[in-house]
Image: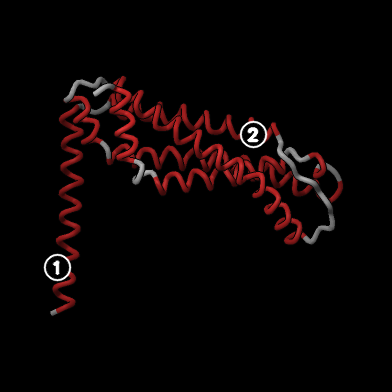
Amino acid sequence: MTFNQITLKNLKSNIKHYVLYLFSLILSIILYFSFVTLQYTHSLNNGSSKIINQGAKVGSVFLFITIIIFLMYANHLFIKRRTREFALFELIGLTRGNILRMLAIEQITLFISTGIIGVIIGILGSKLLLSILIKLMHLHIHASIGFEVAALIQTMIMLMLAFILIMLENAIFLKRRTILSMMKDSMKRVKIHILGWEKRMRFLKKTVL
């Protein structure tokens, strides 16, 4: 089996674990792109509508930081669950570099797919966000929102930065662990899982009795 075949098979086997991560990533991109679109909408740069423009700038900065932290935290939890998988890959001859490359392919695939979906929905989301803000602030304005290239570029920069930091996090994670330590981490999680089920079964028995 070639490296590409292993990577594809591994991605397919882990896609079910990525579902919540994918949903969160798409939602994050939609929100961020919507705020950035409002920030670069020229019709909101004057009069009372300027408040929305300024608020969008603050919101986009807050979302930028929050999304980066969230993605790094979610990635850390996810790779910790895969320590046994990484150890097995090393046992069959893959190097740390191969594993890191595999993770990079996975992240690029996820970021590109979610980025496209997020931006497409984000175009509609920015219009919905603007209408909600106008109603909440009781403003009487008519602003037209379209596709903003600057908003797309800023969203891509955010995703590229997230990708770089995630890969750096993955590299540090793999460097600090040996095959033995990864197998031990895996066994600890299995024991914790079994203990959790035992506690639930005891609770159910007490409840029934």
| Residue 54 screen position, x and y as percent | 74, 44
Q: Amino acid at mark 1?
A: Arg
| Residue 162 screen position, x and y as percent | 49, 32
Nearest the camera: 34 or 77? 34
Q: What secondary structure is found at the residue carrying circle 1?
A: helix
| Residue 95 screen position, x and y as percent | 25, 20
User: What residue is drawn where x is 33% and y is 38%?
Assistant: 12
Up/down of 134 relative to 27, above or below:
below
Q: Is residue 196 left or right of residue 155?
A: left
User: What residue is drawn where x is 30% and y is 25%?
Assistant: 99
Q: Is residue 84 left or right of residue 143?
A: left
What's the distance in space between the residues labelled 1 and 2, CA to CA? 54 Å
Q: Which residue is mark 1?
A: 202
Q: Amino acid at mark 2?
A: Leu
Q: Which mark is residue 76?
A: none
Taking the view exactly as shown, the residue that stands out farthest to the bottom is 209
Q: Residues within 10 Å of mark 1 (few under 14, many from 20)?
A: few
How is the structure coloured here?
A: secondary structure
Quarter occupied by the N terminus:
top left
Up/down of 140 relative to 180, above or below:
below
Nearest the camera: 1 or 75? 1
User: What residue is drawn where x is 36% and y is 29%?
Assistant: 103
Q: What secondary structure is found at the residue carrying circle 2?
A: helix
Nearest the camera: 17 or 198? 17
Q: Residues within 10 Å of mark 2 (few under 14, many from 20)?
A: some
Q: Which residue is mark 2?
A: 152
